[in-house]
Amino acid sequence: MITIYKTAGKNGLDTITTYESGAWVHVVSPSQAEIEDLVLRFSIPPDFFTDPLDVDERARIEREEGNTLIVLRTPRREASEADIPFTTLPIGIILTQGLVITVTLTEVDVVQEFLNGKVRNFSTENRTRFVLLLFLRTSLMFLRYLKDINRTTAAIENDLHKALRNVQLIRLLNMEKSLVFFITSLRSNALMLEKFNTSGCMRMDDDDRDIFEEVVIENKQAIEMANIYTSILTGTMDAFASIISNNLNVIIKLLTTVTIILMIPTLVASIYGMNVELPFQHSPYAFLVAIAFSIIASVIGIVFFWRKEFF
């Protein structure tokens, strides 16, 4: 699907039907025919459109035939029923003939902020500022989602304190996967930003330079935050794993102790059930003696294991 936008003063974005200079062409999950049309129309290499459709595409900058491709990794909040709550997706930013073309496999959260008018001082005609704002909103969205991950993790930990169940541990594991995706993407973006700064692919004035420096700072902060949350989450999962292992050992010790104590009356009854000469077998109190001995031996066993802190 191809949609063309252009800034309309203070009224936000207008949807237009022609490829005008200063427009923003947003391409989502394009068909082969749409890709071929854009390739022929703007003389853009086909892989500039196909590469960003690969969910594993790394962040990078590529220049060819007067066109520039910037691949940026962006965060994505998945549906509530998804196993992994947060993932990342690439967005391709193509600079060509006075236009900005964005290419994504599916709608990404950061683009929706532009379409919903949540980004200030945004103009499709200022390509450099547009690209820098995409960088900045992506870094800020990473930070926002990292805080959401931290809050969700804290809630799961509270549930685990009440009852250790597999479902909470699996949720923690999925949160850890989200953090791994974030760290990998943020580091990839950091390398791309470094090349963006040194390659001079876009001219930046003083205001643009300030925005770029803010992007770098926010990206570094997101990396540090993701690393901290990952370390905390890893330590938490290790602690709960130790707790589960310890609880299992306690249960096994308790069951073993109960089994040994229950074996004492069984052993006495088995001995007096043998067809051999036994003490007190002709006494009218033989049964009571056997019962009393079993009870006394069991009590001694309970006291012994209690002092050994088996239960």
Image: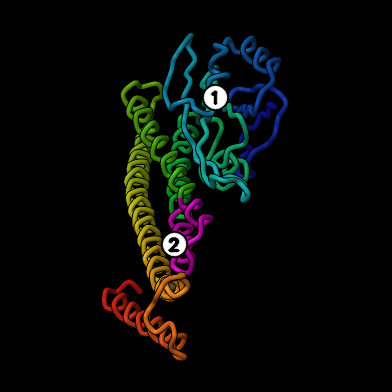
| The quarter of the displayed image where residue 78 is located | top right
Per the image, the residue denoted by label 2 is 157
Residue type at mark 1 is Asp
From the viewer's perspective, tell me whether residue 180 is left or right of residue 102: left
Mark 2, Cα crowd under 10 Å, few <14 / some 14-19 / many 20+, is many
Considering only vertical position in the picture, is 311 above or below 145? Answer: below
Residue type at mark 2 is Glu
On the image, the x and y values in percent for residue 218 come to 37, 44
Residue located at (58% from left, 29% from top): 104
From the viewer's perspective, tell me whether residue 53 is left or right of residue 234: right
Considering only vertical position in the picture, is 115 above or below 6? Answer: below
Per the image, the residue denoted by label 1 is 54
Q: Secondary structure at mark 1?
A: loop
Quadrant in the picture for the N terminus:
top right
| Contact flag, marks 2 and 1 (Cβ < 8 Å) | no
Which region is colored magenta? 149-172
The mark total stands at: 2
Instruction: Give the CA separation, mark 2 to mark 1.
Output: 35 Å
Q: Secondary structure at mark 2?
A: helix
On the image, the x and y values in percent for residue 83 come to 57, 46
Front-most of 130 and 179?
179
On the image, the x and y values in percent for residue 15 come to 70, 34
